[in-house]
Image (tube, rainbow, N blue to C red):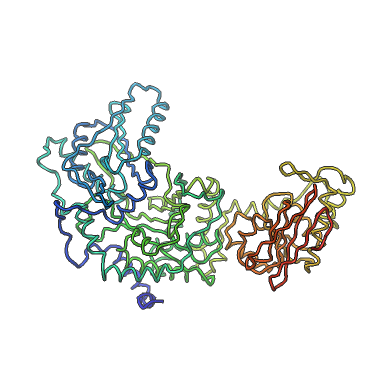
Amino acid sequence: MSDFQRRIANLSPQQHAQLERTLLEQRVVVDEKIKRHDPSKPCPLSFAQQRLWFLDQLIPNTPLYNIPYAVRMIGTLNVEALRQALDVIVQRHEVLRTTVGADDEGEVFQVISESRSIELAMHDLTDVTDGLSRQTRVEELLQNEARRPFNITTDLMIRAMLVCEADDQHVLLIVMHHIASDGWSLDVLARELEAHYAHFCSGGQADTPALPELPIQYADYAAWQRHRLSGEVLERLLSYWREQLGGAPPSLDLPTDRPRTHIQTFDGRQQRRMLPGELVRALQSLSVQEGATLFMTLLGAFNVLLSRYNGRDDIVLGTPITGRNRTETESLIGFFVNTLAVRIDLSGNPTFRQLLARVRDTMLGALSCNDVPYEKLVEEMDPQRNMSQSPLFQAAIAYHHMPQHTMRLGSLNLQKIDVTTGTSKFDLTLSLTETSNGLCALLEYNVGLFDTSTIDHMLGHYHALLESIVCDPDKSIEQMSMMSESEHHQVVVSFNKTATTYPYPDDNSIHHMFERQVAATPNVIAVVFDEIRLTYSQLNERANALACHLRSLKVEPDTPVGVYMNRSLEMAVAVLGVLKAGGAYLPLDPGHPGARIAWMLRESSAPVLITQRALRKALPGTMITTVLLDTSGQVAGSTSKDVVDPIDNQITGDHLAYVIYTSGSTGTPNGVAVSHGAICNH
């Protein structure tokens, strides 16, 4: 623990809360003001802009960083006033008419156009008389425009589309690129559009502005940021992050519905769940008791959820902050938001109260050093390059406690419309937004990794976990329940409805009943996988051979035996073999993270593991007797992850062969091939 972290840990709960409020609400930084950049000199990109430019080169023509904002306007709309208001906003904020250029050496810089007008694309649907068809057409137009990529080297960084549904009903869509905007910027845009629209509706002119001149432009901030975050200041800030993130796990390794692709994909969807006001108030009360904020409590619960999913006690999550800790930036449209990499230690199975104290101290430390851009942090930590996932963290959490400005355009009645780009920047992003009815939990997810049903369950588990936390925050985090009432009923009641129309003999086990079937129908097909078939007799022979070998490995009644296999004929042999040997079958899913498999083996104290050649390298490094079953003639096997020398052995024959490799504590392999039901020592 650093001296800084130690001092934070010694603060009282009231001091913790005051410090956190100060860090979040602080707006004025005591140092020189941001000065206007010399327009005769090239202006660099901000750190955040530079990373988006790099990603745009890597993944061109993507809507991943589009920010859409749509409203339905009911009433008499002054279209010309709206067009003029949008034009004034573009002229007022340089960043919206800024593109990215590069010199002969490849150095990139901002190219600011002196004057550009925005095109208001018009779509007239008044001739579509069927309401359902018209609504479908509106949704198509909104989605297509929201997902249309920007060219950041030529385009205006804002575009607008107006759909006329009827004479007194319009839909306005504004799309900005993240390189020139962020969530806060949407509020700035709404306020300015409101002011300028009213100005032009009342007969105002473009040369008599409705708002005072901006103190600086985004280019001034970018140049100031580059100058300030250098030398001693940058080194002091980075030293905290080196200590905080040093040795952090490079990946979250959540169990997914599909394998991760070699190149990261960004197709995404969203699922919502309302957390009721009563629960939120209870969480708020707990937060106050512990000198924390509601966000810290929600962050702690999300860490517990992910830890229960991946079996790890070291979690790194991303969380965005506004990045506007200077008064000059508050009224600007631009890319100021920064993302913190928050690493939470869940080791030792703490109670939730104890964990919340850890989360609180970690967040306060991160907020005190939040000036380091995420892009600079990635560069500094230099994580192992992996094109299949984002660096530092793969899941994020955001909390929106400040409602967006409700825009008013004259006498128009405005209704906000949700429009998505169909993308997901991370594997998972949990966004929590305050509403009058409670908290809206929105989980954005990568559809290449997760099914909708998985995300529904995850949101349900998060809800149940929060209920468990407020019920008894002094329980250890491993004791916290994540099961909803419906899941609990399914596991406890539905899964235990074992009544059957056929009598089940109380004195017989499954493998004994199987052997009766073998005697009755030895030549009937028992199991089929792809093109391979086994009769009851053949399956029984192979299971007997495996059982014989397991007994030679001291497998006795109730000895747990891990079965780490894909669905296959070998799995059927493995399960029957374990039961015939008297062991307890321990299923291990190859789709689960290695850390979870290692934890299950450790907790069960299983002395033997049965697996397949294709899965052997994926096993966690642990000394355990390993039995390798395979159908291939070429086999390589070893006793543990510590033994790396392969053993190749050719087995001939037309029938299914199983090759078993085991060894003692010295790690020296002893080969045992089981072919056609007989054990032959090599």
Q: Quadrant of the N terminus?
A: bottom left
- Where does residue 647 sit, x and y in percent of width and height? 69, 61
Q: Nearer the viewer, residue 482 or 243?
A: 243
Residue 429 coordinates in the image, percent (x, y): 44, 52
Q: Residue at x 14, y 51 (%)?
A: 39
Residue 510 visible in the picture: no
**Residue 407 spot, x, y in % from top left:** 26, 43
In this rendering, would 650 be left or right of 646? right
Q: Is residue 212 visible?
A: yes
User: 30 left or right of 148?
Assistant: left
- Above or below residue 7? Residue 174 is above
Quadrant location, the C terminus: bottom right
Indicate the quadrant where residue 80 lies: top left
Q: Nearer the viewer, residue 325 or 118?
A: 118
Answer with left or right where residue 184 lies relative to residue 281. left
Q: x%, y% of residue 227?
A: 22, 62
Viewer-proximal residue among 550 and 596? 550
Please report the residue visible at 23 percent of the width from the left and 45 percent of the height from the top: 98
Q: Is residue 70 left or right of residue 274?
A: left
Which residue is the extreme one toward the right?
519
Residue at 74% x, 62% y: name it. 584
Frontmost residue, 19 versus 470: 19
Query: Which image quadrant for residue 399?
Result: bottom left
User: 9 above or below 295?
Assistant: below
